[in-house]
Image: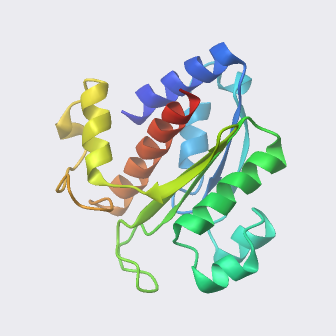
Amino acid sequence: MARLLAARVVDVLGERSETVAFCESLTAGLASATLADIPGASRVLKGGFVTYATESKASVAGVPADVLATEGPVAASTAEAMAGGVREAFGSTFGVSLTGVAGPEPQDGHPVGEVFVAVSGPRGCVAKPASMGEIVEVLGSVGGSFSQIKIGSEDTVGLSGSRAEIRLQSVIVAYSRLLQAVG
């Protein structure tokens, strides 16, 4: 599923001569690597940051210290700053960020599966939590099999499954939101 969406991202951005850069926390480079697996990715992928540690979100991605102090690393405002920071750093058309808790344990009061994905582009930045409903919607739109991904309740805010499943679901949401932002 992620590979199908990655191929679509490469095709759509390539047709428009647009580019993307990723700032990844919980996915630790998975979104960038999955996109790079697609032939032609070099036309659209400018680069990325892995900002796994909270302090790297500030020092590498440019997340303001006050945002991290008040909101923390798992927040829409943090994701928004990460997406804007990576977009600016690489001079890409779009910046995409992923931050959250993959598990297996909650982190600083945030439950496993709480993930924020942001897309920064020419029309602004949208940062919001990921949900299982988005995964179901994406699977339906591309004719995917629901057996490919563990599905929790569609109404649940957040993602569910194992650590690896949550990371993969996060990438799927990121690609889907990027495609929506491109139009």
**Residue 9 left/right relative to 166:** right
| Residue 164, x across and y down, in percent | 38, 56
Residue displayed at 54% across by 48% down: 30
Residue displayed at 57% across by 33% down: 35
> Please, is residue 180 above or below residue 76 in the view?
above
Q: Which color scheme does this rendered protein use?
A: rainbow
| Residue 25, x across and y down, in percent | 58, 62
Query: Quadrant of the rendered structure where residue 95 is?
Result: top right
- Quarter in which the N terminus is drawn: top left
> Please, is residue 161 above or below residue 86 in the view?
below
Residue displayed at 16% across by 56% down: 153
How many numbered marks, from 0 up?
Answer: 0
**Residue 26 left/right relative to 149:** right
> What is the residue that sits farthest to the front in this orientation?
123
Residue 156 or 7: which is nearer the viewer?
156
Residue 75 or 102: which is nearer the viewer?
75
> What is the residue that sits farthest to the top in this orientation?
15
> Please, is residue 24 above or below residue 65 in the view?
above
**Residue 124 left/right relative to 8:** right
Residue displayed at 20% across by 52% down: 154
**Residue 126 left/right relative to 139:** right
| Residue 161, x across and y down, in percent | 26, 59
| Residue 147, x across and y down, in percent | 17, 39
Query: Quadrant of the rendered structure where residue 172 is?
Result: top left
Residue 20 or 4: which is nearer the viewer?
20
Query: Quadrant of the rendered structure where residue 155 is?
Result: bottom left
